[in-house]
């Protein structure tokens, strides 16, 4: 039978001065999952190997690990799909400290989730026995996000978290979405306001890694886009991200192209002197390298066509009800995300 080598990250902080890799050679049995393979290694070769597992059925979210550089669920992945060259490298999931071997300290992940009140806040607690019903259509708005199994694969591979561990992260933003779009939750506006703060929804760079790694239908990046849409519909625009969106729209709708001199100042705010001064060094560096955009901003040749697209969009936006208003019991329009992005 064909053989496969599992090259596994090993580290016991109480014993080892440095992490190292250990190779385990085993038979590549047909139909075996990576988790089955690890169980076999532990049962027959090395009982000291540490990793998390529970359900074996892609439900509990505990067996996430990095395989050949990307996070996945060991119990959901066939070993033969990974072992193309006879070698599979296995590391702990990223952006968290290692406790032992493939076991990481998940506390930063839980701490981030706690920031967004990951539970329903109903409009009244007067009648706790009250059944809070939803229509099927209302439930479909949150259906995808309710499949999240909190495996932290997205957290592990998020590029922003790699450089800034204050960022809320994809799973947390998806969890916020789950309650923002829940017809029974009374705090949609407050949730949206919180999430537009620094390290929130505007800090995502849209790399798509979280959606690619997510083993469920949650697909966090698409949910982040929907939160941004809700933020703009609620007119929560006193923040850099929303001003950036508005500035983008203003310049492209007028000239057909981005005015890169206007956009940075529009994003931070024209009267935000410290932030404007903060932009100066970049501007000077661009000037010295000859990369500054032209001072006179010109329209593109077919600007009329761009304008007509924007006027059609405006008409489309006008027929959208603004369901989120400050202080109200907030409800998002069921139809506003009828075309779900994945
Ligand atoms: S799309 Fe955003 S949240 Fe997702 S991995 Fe990339 S930066 Fe992180
Ligand atoms: S969003 Fe997907 S990848 Fe992230 S924790 Fe939930 S199930 Fe895991
Ligand atoms: S063991 Fe539960 S998700 Fe893999």
Image: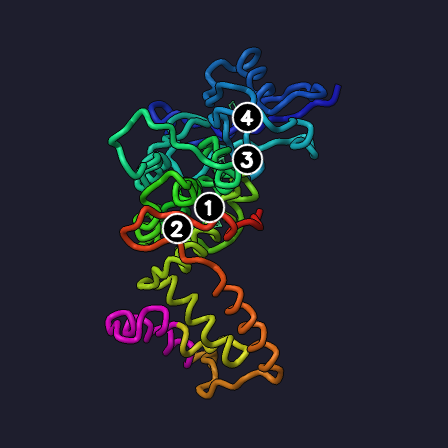
Looking at the rendered structure, the secondary structure element under dot 4 is: loop
Could you tell which of marks 2 and 4 lies nearer the N-terminus? 4
List the single residue furthest toward the top. Answer: 44
Classify mark 1: residues with Cα within 10 Å, few (<14), some (14-19) or many (20+).
many
The percent position of residue 230, horizontal first and vertical second, equals 42, 54
Looking at the rendered structure, the secondary structure element under dot 2 is: helix
Write the start and end of the magenta stretch as one range. Answer: 264-287
Classify mark 4: residues with Cα within 10 Å, few (<14), some (14-19) or many (20+).
many
Could you tell which of marks 1 and 4 lies nearer the N-terminus? 4
How many angstroms separate mark 3 from mark 2 (CA)?
26 Å
Residue 153 visible to an observer of this rendering? no
Circle 4 residue: 58
Rendered position, 184 above or below 80 = below
Residue at the image point whose x is 45% and y is 35% from the top = 134
The percent position of residue 167, horizontal first and vertical second, equals 36, 48
Dominant secondary structure (helix, strand or loop) of the stretch shown in magenta: helix
The percent position of residue 114, horizontal first and vertical second, equals 31, 37
Circle 2 residue: 163
Circle 3 residue: 216
Instruction: Give yes or no for residue 178 being in the magenta stretch.
Output: no
Circle 1 residue: 158
Looking at the rendered structure, the secondary structure element under dot 1 is: loop
């Amino acid at each position: 039978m064909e053989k496969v080598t599992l090259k596994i990250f090993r580290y016991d902080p109480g014993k080892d001065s440095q992490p190292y890799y250990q190779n385990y050679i085993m038979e590549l049995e047909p139909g075996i999952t990576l988790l089955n393979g690890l169980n076999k290694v532990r049962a027959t070769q090395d009982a000291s190997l540490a990793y998390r597992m529970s359900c074996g059925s892609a439900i509990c979210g505990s067996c996430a690990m990095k395989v050949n550089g990307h996070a996945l669920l060991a119990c959901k992945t066939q070993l033969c799909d990974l072992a193309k060259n006879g070698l599979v490298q296995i590391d702990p999931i990223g952006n968290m400290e290692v406790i032992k071997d493939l076991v990481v300290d998940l506390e930063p992940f839980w701490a981030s989730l706690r920031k967004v009140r990951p539970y329903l806040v109903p409009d009244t607690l007067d009648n706790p026995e009250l059944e809070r019903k939803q229509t099927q259509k209302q439930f479909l708005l949150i259906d995808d996000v309710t499949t999240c199994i909190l495996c932290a694969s997205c957290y592990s591979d998020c590029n922003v978290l790699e450089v800034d561990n204050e960022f809320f992260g994809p799973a947390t933003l998806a969890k916020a979405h789950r309650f923002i779009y829940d017809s029974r939750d009374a705090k949609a506006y407050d949730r949206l306001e919180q999430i537009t703060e620094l390290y929130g929804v505007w800090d995502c760079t849209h790399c798509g890694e979280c959606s690619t790694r997510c083993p469920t239908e949650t697909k966090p990046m698409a949910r982040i886009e929907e939160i941004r849409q809700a933020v703009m519909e609620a007119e929560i625009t006193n923040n850099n991200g929303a001003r950036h969106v508005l500035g983008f729209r203003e310049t492209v709708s007028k000239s057909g192209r981005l005015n890169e001199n206007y956009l940075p100042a529009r994003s931070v705010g024209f009267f935000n002197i410290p932030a404007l001064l903060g932009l100066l060094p970049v501007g000077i560096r661009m000037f010295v390298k000859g990369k500054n955009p032209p001072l006179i901003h010109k329209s593109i040749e077919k600007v009329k066509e761009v304008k007509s697209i924007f006027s059609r969009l405006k008409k489309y936006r006008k027929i959208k009800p603004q369901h989120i208003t400050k202080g109200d019991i907030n409800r998002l329009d069921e139809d506003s995300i009828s075309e779900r992005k994945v």
